[in-house]
Image (cartoon, rainbow, N blue to C red):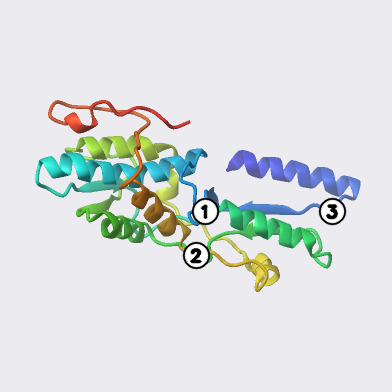
C-alpha cells in the first residue's frame, strides 16, 4: 500500500507540473465476479479465497465424514473487522462510466463496497452453506493457534499473504464516486459473502486440489497429498 501511494504521489506531481489532468481510481480488494458463470478464477486473491471455501467443503466430505464429526475451524482475524472487496466487473463499469462523463473534473474516486460484511458474517455464511460448525475468528496476529488441526494450519498458510486484511477495517470516502455512479452502475454489496458462497457451492461438484503449503500428520490421510495450485 505504501508503494502504491508513493507511485500515485509521483505521478500526480508530474502531471501537475505539466498541466495534465489526472484521474485516479482506488478500488478496494478486487476479486473475480461471483455472478459470472466461470469458476476458473486465476488471480491470487480470488484463488486463495475460493480455496478457503472449497477446502472447507473438501474437509467436511472427507475427514469430517470419516470421524463422524463436523470439523471446527479457527481463522486468524478480528470478527468485527470488515473485508472490503469489489468484483472486477464493477470496477471496470465504474471506471468507464466516470471516464465517459465529460462534466467531471479530474479527481480521485474510491470504488468500494458501501456495506462490507464483518468477518464473523463471512464465517457464518460459510457455516450455513457447508453445514460446518465451530468456525470462529482467532483474534491474535502472532500467537500460534494452540492445538491447531491440519485444516487450520493449511487454511492459515493459504490466507497468510492477506492476513492484515482480516484485522483492519479501512474507511473509504466514496461519496464522490457514488454521486456520479448512482443510477448508472449497479452498486454491489456483500460481494465477499456472495463469492465465498459461490466457491463453496462449486466445491460440491468440482475437483479441487488445495493448497499453498501442506502440513500432513499421521492420521490425516484425506489431505496428505494436497498440492499447490496457487500462483
Secondary structure category for the residue under label 1? loop
Residue 165 lies, in percent from the top left, at: 45, 48
Q: Is residue 56 above or below residue 23?
A: above
The residue beneath circle 2 is 189
Q: Sequence-wise, which precedes: disc 2 or disc 3?
A: 3
Q: Residue at x 34, y 50 (%)?
A: 200
How many angstroms separate mark 3 from mark 1 (CA)?
A: 34 Å
Could you say which disc has been placed on residue 36 in the image? 1
Local crowd at mark 1 within 10 Å, few (<14), some, or many (≥20)? few
Give the image location of residue 52, x and y in percent.
Answer: 35, 44
Q: Is residue 131 depicted above or below 183 in this figure?
A: above
- Structural distance between the alpha carbons of marks 2 and 3: 31 Å
What is the count of numbered marks? 3
What's the CA distance linking mark 2 and mark 1? Answer: 16 Å
> Is 186 above or below relative to 145?
below
Mark 2 element type: loop
The residue indicated by pointer 3 is 21
Quarter holding the N terminus? top right
Which of these two is toward me, 202 or 140? 202
Amino acid at each position: 500500500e505504501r508503494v502504491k501511494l508513493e507511485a500515485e504521489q509521483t505521478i500526480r506531481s508530474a502531471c501537475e507540473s505539466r498541466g495534465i489532468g489526472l484521474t485516479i481510481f482506488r478500488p478496494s480488494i478486487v476479486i473475480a465476479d461471483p455472478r459470472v458463470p466461470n469458476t476458473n478464477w486465476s488471480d491470487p486473491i480470488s484463488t486463495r479465497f475460493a480455496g478457503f471455501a472449497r477446502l472447507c467443503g473438501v474437509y467436511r466430505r472427507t475427514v469430517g465424514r470419516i470421524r463422524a464429526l463436523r470439523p471446527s475451524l479457527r481463522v486468524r482475524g478480528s470478527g468485527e473487522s470488515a473485508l472490503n472487496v469489489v468484483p472486477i466487473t464493477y470496477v471496470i463499469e465504474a471506471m468507464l462510466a466516470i471516464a465517459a462523463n465529460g462534466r467531471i473534473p479530474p479527481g480521485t474516486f474510491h470504488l468500494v463496497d458501501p456495506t462490507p460484511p464483518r468477518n464473523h458474517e463471512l464465517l457464518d455464511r460459510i457455516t450455513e452453506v457447508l453445514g460446518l460448525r465451530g468456525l470462529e475468528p482467532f483474534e491474535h496476529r502472532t500467537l500460534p493457534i494452540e492445538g491447531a488441526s491440519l485444516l487450520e494450519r493449511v487454511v492459515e498458510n493459504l490466507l497468510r499473504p492477506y492476513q492484515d486484511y482480516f484485522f483492519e477495517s479501512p474507511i473509504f470516502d466514496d461519496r464522490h464516486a457514488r454521486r456520479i455512479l448512482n443510477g448508472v452502475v449497479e452498486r454491489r454489496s456483500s460481494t465477499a459473502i456472495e463469492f465465498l458462497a459461490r466457491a463453496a457451492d462449486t466445491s460440491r461438484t468440482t475437483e479441487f486440489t488445495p493448497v499453498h503449503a501442506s502440513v500432513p500428520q499421521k492420521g490425516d490421510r484425506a489431505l496428505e497429498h494436497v498440492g499447490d495450485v496457487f500462483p
